Amino acid sequence: MAVPFGPVQRTRLLGEALGRALLALDRRVLLLGSGGLSHDPPLPTLEGAPPEVAARLIAGRQPTPEERAGRENRVRDAGLAVAAGKPGPRLNPDWDRAFLDLLAKGRLTATDTWTNAWITAEAGNSTHEVRTWLACYAALAAAGPYTMRSSFYRPIPEWIAGFGITIAETRRNP
């Protein structure tokens, strides 16, 4: 995930538009949204990055094997430290559960007022991946009310991420 991010409302509206387009197909469709919930792994960000890192982030160049190994080691070490109770990248299970509850209740427009800075401050730099969840639920909601049939959540400190799985379906006839 990298800045600049568009407004969160834009993500929801994109999901709604996708949902309307899928409805026009008059077929059963499976939507999959993925991405971590709260997480803030020790990965470089554009702001404050050394010039060579900034150039790689902007150009999208793949890291060398050595760079990748270094990054993986930093993330692994941070995850182990967090799991051992040491200070490090944070998780926010309360935020994660509130977000999943918002999806379950269909309160998607509540995210319209969220700012990018607020999401980052509350749940971490990489939490913006939840936009895929929001877009998928907005697409589903375009078909009418839905029911979240199943929801599982667990914070996984070793992964420096909140992990969740949900299953939802429209209340329309299949």
Image (cartoon, rainbow, N blue to C red):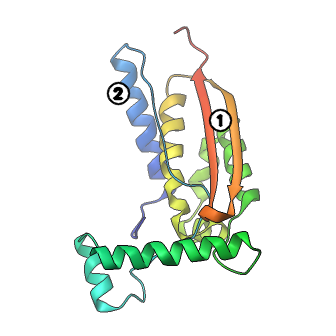
Quadrant location of residue 20?
A: top left
**What residue type is disc 2 on?**
Ala
At label 1, which amino acid type do we have?
Answer: Gly
Q: Nearer the viewer, residue 22 or 95?
A: 95
Total numbered labels: 2
Give the answer, above or below, for where 18 lies relative to 88: above
Q: Residues within 10 Å of mark 2 (few under 14, many from 20)?
A: few
171 to 38, vertically: above or below: above
Quadrant housing residue 173: top right
Tell me if label 2 and label 1 are in contact, CB under 8 Å.
Answer: no
Q: Which residue is mark 1?
A: 106
The mark that comes first in sequence, 2 or 1, is 2
Bin the neighbour count of mark 1 within 10 Å (Cα to Cα): few under 14, some 14-19, many 20 and up. some
Image coords of residue 172 (percent x, y)? 57, 13
| Element carrying mark 1 | loop
The structure residue drawn at horizontal position 43% and vertical position 64%, both measured from the top left corner, is 1
Q: Which residue is mark 2?
A: 21
The residue under the point 33% across, 17% down is 25
- Compare residues 172 and 34 and report the one nearer the observer: 34
Depicted 165 relative to depicted 76: above or below: above
Q: Nearer the viewer, residue 118 or 73?
A: 73
Q: Is residue 20 left or right of residue 140?
A: left
| Residue found at the far top of this picture | 173
Residue 42 in sight from this viewpoint: no
Q: Position of residue 71 (x, y in %)?
A: 43, 76
Relative to 67, residue 164 above or below: above
Q: Residue at x 54, y 30 (%)?
A: 141
- The label on residue 4 is none
Residue 129: x and y in percent read 49, 56
